[in-house]
Image (tube, rainbow, N blue to C red):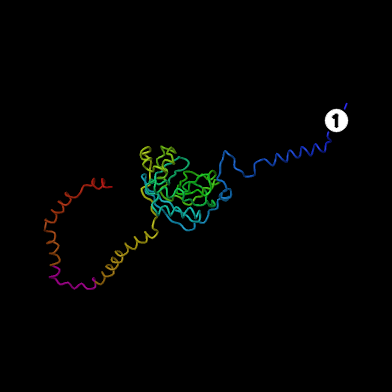
Amino acid sequence: MRCFRLPSALPLFILMLSVFVVAGCIRSKPGEPEASSPTVPGVSDLSAPAGDSEPEPGETFQVKFETSKGDFIVEAYSGWAPIGAARFKELVTSGFYDGCRFFRVIPGFMVQWGINGDPKVQKKWVNNMIPDEKVLQKNRRGTISFAKSSAPNSRTAQIFINYKDNTANLNPQGFSPFAKVIQGMDVVDAINAEYRQTPKQGRIQSEGNAYLNKEFPNLDYIIKATIIDPTADDKTEAESSPPKTEASKTKSSEPKKAEQPKTTEPEKKAAKEEPKKETKPAASKTPATKEKKESPKPETIEEVK
């Protein structure tokens, strides 16, 4: 009978150690996203810095959105996301957002828009993408970021306003705020959300507002978006200043008139009689009442609007 020799303890230990090493090598790499929480590839270094430190605002500009629900104003900051702020300004200046529908409204999350109602216009922008940039600001309530696909450098024209603090969810995915609502957040909150995210983006791209008006007629929309002129207040003050200077001039000239009261008694009598003559003619009152009767009704003005 042949005898089989059992392997010594040392080779067996080496064999088991090798198995553990191989098993460890095929595990997931550190930081690799799980399938249940997808993140944008290549943007793991774009998340917001720890702590509550605020980035410098840099150059700023304001945009007024006139909508079917009311007006709201946003302020953009180049210090938060210079590429996003520049693209936003370009879109507003070109009139791209005029007529756009708020096609995705999810209460407690965000409101999204930025697909032009004219498919021909939309076609010019759909592939005009801008690169991703480091996330410096948190996606807090009222902040605005560009929407994008899961692919890197896919931002074009779609933007959204955060209804709540979505920092924990959106910052790790590389959504970089570039602006925030500074006036009219109550209007943003009131945007119609009955359709949620039912409208199909593909059909909006190809059919535009014709598709939305037919199947989602109650969507709120942007009437016009315009950049606010920072010198507008200065202009109004400058325009109103001439009357003030004239008034001050008349006030300054009043003492001079008071120093020369050389009116004679006949002139005083004439001055007293002139107001009586001016108040006598009643004919001037009659046309005034006729003009009031013949003036256009307020309803016509409302209909024009």
Inspect the image, locate mark 1, and give the three-letter code of the amino acid beneath it: Phe
- Image x and y of residue 101, in percent: 39, 44
**Image-quadrant location for residue 40:** top right
Q: Is residue 242 above or below residue 131?
A: below
- Quarter of the rendering occupied by the N terminus: top right
Whether residue 267 appears in magenta in the rendering, the answer is: yes
Whether residue 256 appears in magenta in the rendering, the answer is: no
Q: Is residue 79 above or below residue 140?
A: below
* Region of the chain picked out in magenta, as a range: 257-269
The residue that appears at 39% across and 53% down in the rendered structure is 94
- Image x and y of residue 274, in percent: 13, 64
Q: Nearer the viewer, residue 83 or 259?
A: 83
From the image, tell me which residue sits under label 1: 4
Number of numbered discs overlaid on the protein picture: 1
The residue that appears at 13% across and 56% down in the rendered structure is 284
Residue 75 as seen in the image, left or right of residue 267? right
Residue 284 as seen in the image, left or right of residue 193? left
Q: Nearer the viewer, residue 119 or 144?
A: 119
